[in-house]
Amino acid sequence: MRRSRAFIPTTKEVPNDATLPSHQFLVRGGFINQQGAGLYNFLPLGKIVLEKIRTIVKEELDMAGCNEVQLSFVTPIGLWDRSGRADAMGKEMLRIQDRHQNDFVLSPTNEEAMVELVKNRVTSYKDLPLNLYQINTKFRDEARPRYGLLRGREFLMKDGYSFHASTEDMIREFDLMEETYKKIFTRLGLDFRVVQADSGAIGGEGSKEFHVLADSGEDTIIVCESCDYGANIETIFDNEEEVDALNEKTYEELQTKEISEKCSCGGNLSFKKGIEVGHIFQLGTKYSSALEANFSDENGKPRPFEMATFGIGVSRLVASVIEQNHDENGCIWTKETAPYTINIMVSNIKDETQMTLGEELYLKLLGENVEAMFDDRKERFGFKMKDAELIGFPYTVIIGKELDNGLVQVYDRKTQEKISVKTGDIYKHIM
Ligand code: ATP
Ligand code: MG
Ligand code: MG
Ligand code: MG
């Protein structure tokens, strides 16, 4: 992409309500903009990052045998009446009415609709197991939408639902999804923990959450320093006020609190703050029973499906990457999430030799399928460099004075190191 043609409205202005780095830098870097409370537009850069994350999620799920579908975002209220969740979901579920006074819901999650889809289409134990997922818009009328993409009202979620003939098989899939989710978050370059969790309004038995470790996280988790045990404090303290009080505390405040208990492995336990980016639940037959979704078992007897459900906050992940990877100047994208890998910058745009090399390098990189941006704007070098810092291109190739000696500079956004390399060796230093 040539920067002169790109729509990347960067700004120095920090939105009034933006307290977190991810919120500030994603808006200032021209990735997203706010449309209303908890409602965000994805601009070209934000859209590229979102698609990259979506693609990684899809690749790993498809490899694990899941099928992608896309359900209607608006669902008739009747479905929710039958499962009993029309009331249980409370005010987060937004209702709307059509011109005939029929009631609908903007999907906050899709257990009911997915059961309805499978019901009478999957009829035999021979057709099981089955794992269906979508990556689709969700709407939750959050009491306090805040922190930009971290807690929106409209957001993008991957929600998956699996159907099984036995509890054992459902648990096998649950474990497989745990492994698959770990692969996804590892590919995204995130530092995360898997923790025991509460099932909340979704219901069901076992449940685990995936937390990106960040001081700004809204959740408090306890992790073992010696093994991979972890738990959301919601599972440890029954008292809701106690949980809320701990969640109010900052990471530093929590470090002064002693945990006298040891982990079962003998290791020390400590408090961490986390952003919930994934949640997997063993549901059992809660929804299949309520909606009378049965299959016939080996003896021809009808039985409700054993189910599990699996969620990932896809748009929340965009912000989570930046909560974990930024400095005072802006975003630092991880390898797989960066909107462009290389930014090409000419230090003196009036110098024809420099401009020609910039152009040549840009076309060469495109030919090699490298995601490159060519900053061909007629602006000051310092201004353009600040802009590149804010956006967070992993590498900027600076074509400047050293060109007379056949050298250009490669700037690494993360380490902030600049090294001089021969023009022919640029590629080698970047990959
Ligand atoms: P939270 O505790 O943060 O409110 P949740 O437990 O209500 O999340 P789930 O029902 O488990 O959310 O939904 C699956 C995933 O969807 C969550 O793990 C999270 O990553 C994402 N998610 C939930 N609510 C939001 C939101 N308001 N904005 C962005 N992502 C969200
Ligand atoms: Mg919630
Ligand atoms: Mg939660
Ligand atoms: Mg959850």
Image: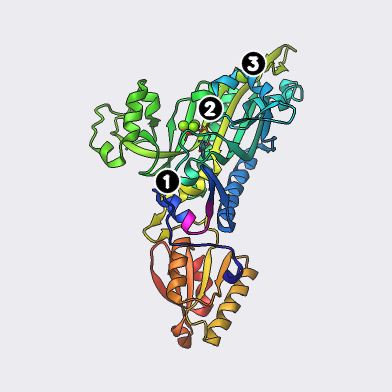
> Would you call the spot at circle 2 few (<14 residues within 10 Å), some (14-19), or many (20 or more)?
few
> Which numbered circle lies on residue 152?
none
291 lies left or right of 181: right
382 and 199: which is toward the camera: 382
> Which secondary structure, mark 1?
loop
Q: Secondary structure at mark 2?
A: helix
Residue 296 horizontal/vertical position (percent): 73, 16
Instruction: Judge whether 131 appears above or below 21 on screen.
Output: above
Placement of 54 over or under 236, stated as above or below: below
Residue, disc 2: 91
Q: Is mark 3 within 8 Å of ligand 1?
A: no
Closer-to-camera residue (63/249): 249
Asked if residue 223 can be seen in this view, the reply is no
* Marks 1 and 2, the one that precedes in the sequence: 2
Residue 219 appears in which quarter of the rendering? top left
Q: How is the image coloured?
A: rainbow
Spatial separation of the CA atoms under disc 3 and disc 1:
39 Å
Where residue 140 sits, quadrant-wise, is top right
The circle drawn on residue 191 is 1
Reading the chain from its start, which is encountered first: label 3 or label 1? Answer: 1
| Res 417 quadrant in image | bottom left
Give, as a single range, the part of the protein colored magenta. 27-33
- Image quadrant containing the N terminus: bottom right
Q: Earlier in the sequence, mark 3 or mark 2?
A: 2
Is residue 422 positioned above or below 157 on the image? Answer: below
Q: Looking at the picture, which amino acid does disc 3 mark?
A: Ala
Horizontal and vertical percent for residue 76?
69, 26
Residue at x 67%, y 28% (from the top left corner)? 104
* Residue underneath mark 3: 290
